[in-house]
Image (cartoon, rainbow, N blue to C red):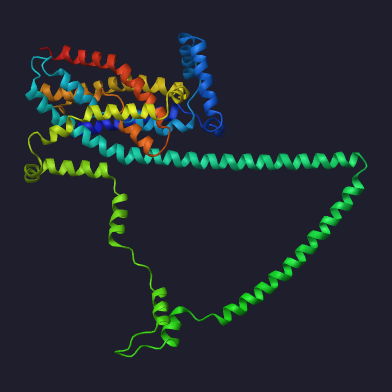
């Protein structure tokens, strides 16, 4: 089971890497589109969607998705949304809906299939909050560097433009017989500048000599003051106030212990640590008997599905609906088509291959849990990571919204194929 989970993880990552490599260009989103023109472009696209009609607007977006590659900013989004799967709330919701609707899948079978959900959820949670978080952070860093280079290049171009304009102005003055006046004015400015430079040279020499004299006179360090100049207090006598001030200034400030502990906890990846701790507790029987109480974990797990939907809705409404119209059409098209059709088809082929080799269990209860895991769309945690890193969270949320709408139909088709293989 673990081996097949790793195989599906590697397959998803390979698909995400290929999508990021072949669907993105080498150009970043211009700075104007991210600042001043963002509201203008979103309002214009909204007006186009309302004025041109729904069909023509969708056709325009579809043609743009086919012909225009995604900007380079979308590479981390391709990796984290294409290369990950929803292994928690989506499979749990499907499995709960199947209880009682299939003759051989009852409550006991559902409890048995939760072990598969636990394996996938633990593995993918560790991966998303380690590799996925690093992917988004590195993408945000590369985009900041690219924007800084672009700003520097724009500043250099502006400077060259000003210099060219100045040269043209001088030529215009020369053509109007004002060259003599301009030359005289330049000579006066040069003389003033030369005089200022001479004064600055004199001041710099005086400062240098004064600094050298100060270094010679003040070369005694604080340690020398403590050891040689400040008298050592005899036993039974208190030190003077000046000596205590010098000793206190020489010692480094101590950091409180609670601050050190808080800094260590801030560097700890809590989702990864929690997943590893859950695996350890589940695999060690004494720890499982100590921490697991019947119904306790179930009460927490029952809130998984509504909380994830609440997070998705909060991300949708955080930036409003206008930013959703600016999402790259190719990202929406490729992300939805790959995650609902292409990647599930690849995973189903791997399912049959591993079944032929003998890597899958013979129990059909566990097999339907594996089947539900491999046909799931992107996880909601991808939008949470993008929101935490402030990196195009609206784009990831818009893709997940479209994926979950399409997954309503594609998931039904994939489950129908499984039920044809394992009829009631």
Residue 85 visible from this viewpoint: no
Please report the residue visible at 70 percent of the width from the left and 72 percent of the height from the top: 205
Q: Is residue 248 above or below residue 6?
A: below
* Count of numbered circles in the view: 0
State the image coordinates of residue 370 (x, y, percent, origin top left): 19, 25
Left or right: 275 with respect to 254?
Answer: left
Residue 398 versus residue 101 in the image, above or below: below
Residue 64 in the image: above or below residue 197:
above
Q: Quadrant of the N terminus?
A: top left
Task: Using residue 135 as the reference point, say whether residue 191 is left or right of it.
Answer: right
Q: Nearer the viewer, residue 233 or 273?
A: 233
Q: Is residue 211 visible?
A: yes
Rendered-image quadrant of the C terminus:
top left
Residue at 62% across / 80% down in the picture? 213
Query: Which quadrant of the view contains residue 390?
Result: top left
Q: Who is closer to the viewer here, 194 or 127? A: 194
Identity of the residue drawn at 43% across and 81% down: 242
In the figure, residue 418 lies in which quadrant? top left
Eyeballing the image, is 50 above or below 291?
Answer: above
* Residue drawn at (80%, 62%) of the image: 194
Residue 25 in the image, given as x and y percentages of width and height? 50, 29
Describe residue 413's horizontal placement relative to residue 64 as left or right. left
Question: Which of the two residues, 422 or 275, is positioned nearer the viewer here?
Answer: 275
Q: Position of residue 150 (x, y in %)?
A: 57, 39
Q: Position of residue 209 (x, y in %)?
A: 66, 76
């Amino acid at each position: 089971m673990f081996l097949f989970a790793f195989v599906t993880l590697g397959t998803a990552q390979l698909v995400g890497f290929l999508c990021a490599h072949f669907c993105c260009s080498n150009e970043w989103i211009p700075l104007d589109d991210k600042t001043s023109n963002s509201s203008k472009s979103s309002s214009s696209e909204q007006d186009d969607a309302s004025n041109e009609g729904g069909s023509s607007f969708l056709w325009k977006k579809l043609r743009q998705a086919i012909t225009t590659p995604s900007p380079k900013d979308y590479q981390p989004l391709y990796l984290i949304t294409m290369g990950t799967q929803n292994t928690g709330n989506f499979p749990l919701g499907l499995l709960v809906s199947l209880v009682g609707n299939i003759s051989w899948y009852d409550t006991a079978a559902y409890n048995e299939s939760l072990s598969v959900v636990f394996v996938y959820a633990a593995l993918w949670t560790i991966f998303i909050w380690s590799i996925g978080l690093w992917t988004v952070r590195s993408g945000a860093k590369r985009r900041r560097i690219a924007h800084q280079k672009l700003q520097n290049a724009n500043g250099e171009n502006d400077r060259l433009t000003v210099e060219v304009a100045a040269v043209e102005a001088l030529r215009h003055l020369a053509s109007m017989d004002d060259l003599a006046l301009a030359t005289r004015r330049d000579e006066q400015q040069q003389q003033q500048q030369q005089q200022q430079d001479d004064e600055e040279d004199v001041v710099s020499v005086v400062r240098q000599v004064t600094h050298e004299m100060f270094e010679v006179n003040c070369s005694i360090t604080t340690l020398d003051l403590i050891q040689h100049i400040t008298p050592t207090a005899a036993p039974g006598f208190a030190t003077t106030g000046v000596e205590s001030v010098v000793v206190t200034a020489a010692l480094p400030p101590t950091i409180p212990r609670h601050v050190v502990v808080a800094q260590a906890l801030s560097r700890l990846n809590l989702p990864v640590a929690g997943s590893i701790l859950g695996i350890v507790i589940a695999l060690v029987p004494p720890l499982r008997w100590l921490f697991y109480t019947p119904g306790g974990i179930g009460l927490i797990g029952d809130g998984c599905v509504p909380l994830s939907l609440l997070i998705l809705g909060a991300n949708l409404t955080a930036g409003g609906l206008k930013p959703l119209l600016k999402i790259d059409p190719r990202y929406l098209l490729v992300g939805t088509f790959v995650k609902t059709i292409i990647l599930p088809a690849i995973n189903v082929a791997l399912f049959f291959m591993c079944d032929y080799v003998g890597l899958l269990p013979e129990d059909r209860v566990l097999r339907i849990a594996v089947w539900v895991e491999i046909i799931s769309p992107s996880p909601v945690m991808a939008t949470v990571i993008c929101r935490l890193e402030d990196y195009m969270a609206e784009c990831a949320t818009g893709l997940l919204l479209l994926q979950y709408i399409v997954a309503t139909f594609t998931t039904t088709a994939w489950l129908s194929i499984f039920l044809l293989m394992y009829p009631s």
